[in-house]
Image (cartoon, rainbow, N blue to C red):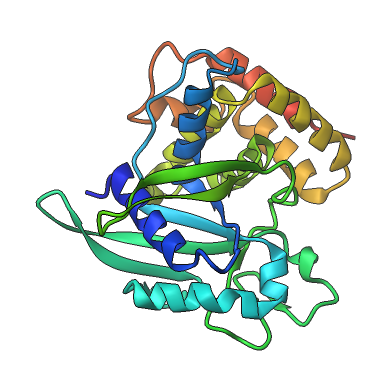
Amino acid sequence: MITIPDLRASLLDLLREIKSADLRLIIGGGFGLFLRTEQVRKSGVRTLLSVWPESRSTNDLDLFLRPEFLINQQKLKPLSDALSRLGYRAVPGAEKYQFFKSVSAGEGTDLIKIDILTGARDRFSGTPVKTDRRRVRPNPSVGIHAHPVDEAPTLEENLLPITLSGTSSTGVEMQSEIFLPHPYSFLMMKLFAFSDRFNDEDKDFGRYHALDLYSIMAVTSEQEWNNALALRERFSRNPWVAKAGRLVADYFSSLNGMGMVRLRESRYFRPDLQLEKFMSLLGELFPIRD
């Protein structure tokens, strides 16, 4: 089974390979949330919720590329070369934006998967970059595509820089700067991920996304909350923000809503989680607007 130290080591391996490229990776997904929780715990800052669930396991690294790197495609060549040197192979059907490799895990081996993503497709309007629902393709190609996340219009807003430190898989102690999405952006992405998966048995009915929504809100600081309210107003006319409000109303506005049902079904659920306050905060951040 892939562990958090395995993911940290694999990310450090990649960061070491691209250290001279200045790619400034944004780390999302379950591991990004783990790193955010770790950072908040170390800082001791006051957060919106006092009861946090256990961090869930994951075997994915979600790497978000800023649009500027896909527009100026030569900046991506070091990333493509690094993935090849580290032994990553393309996932069939998702070539150039999903990769995997076998690593030692416990007494056996398991797979670590890397997803290459970026923000909304409208960021590439008027550029040579080609986009569709599944892919953002630099032109000319350098062996790296990215999966667009239209539901993250605020991806580049209020990023949190952190220093990732630890031991690479080769035993080298190192540290490197990465960035984490703002809680508002994290919540947007998780809301839409949940809406896509809450009826999908193969995706655990979206239970881990419902739990992640609570976890993100739990580790949001008061300053980040104020920033999130400002983002809510700045992006109030964005259609994805409007859709997010409807998702919250449909799935997370009552304990009987499917989102809250799935959250309570999660194996990481604890009876002392502050569900009422969580729903209130989520509804305030993503209201339904006329």
Residue 254 visible in the shown view: yes
Toward the bottom, the furthest residue is: 140
Image vertical order of residue 165 relative to residue 265, above or below: below
Q: How many marks?
A: 0
| Residue 133 on image: x %, y % | 65, 69
Image vertical order of residue 1 relative to residue 25, above or below: above
- Residue at the image position 79 percent from the left and 65 percent from the top: 122
| Residue 12 on image: x %, y % | 40, 55
Of residues 184 and 20, the one nearer the viewer is 20
* Image quadrant in which you'd find residue 188: top right
- Residue at the image position 58 percent from the left and 69 percent from the top: 146
Q: Is 63 situated left or right of 139 in this image?
A: left
| Residue 118 on image: x %, y % | 63, 62
Image vertical order of residue 67 relative to residue 204, above or below: below
Of residues 17 and 101, the one nearer the viewer is 17
Of residues 206 and 41, the one nearer the viewer is 41
* Image quadrant in which you'd find residue 17: bottom left
Image vertical order of residue 122 relative to residue 211, above or below: below
- Residue at the image position 69 percent from the left and 19 percent from the top: 222
| Residue 53 on image: x %, y % | 42, 23
Q: Is 67 situated left or right of 193 in this image?
A: right
Q: Is 53 situated left or right of 23 in this image?
A: left
Of residues 94 and 6, the one nearer the viewer is 6
Residue 258 visible in the shown view: no
Q: Is 46 situated left or right of 199 in this image?
A: right
Q: Where is the C terminus found, in terms of image quarters?
A: top right
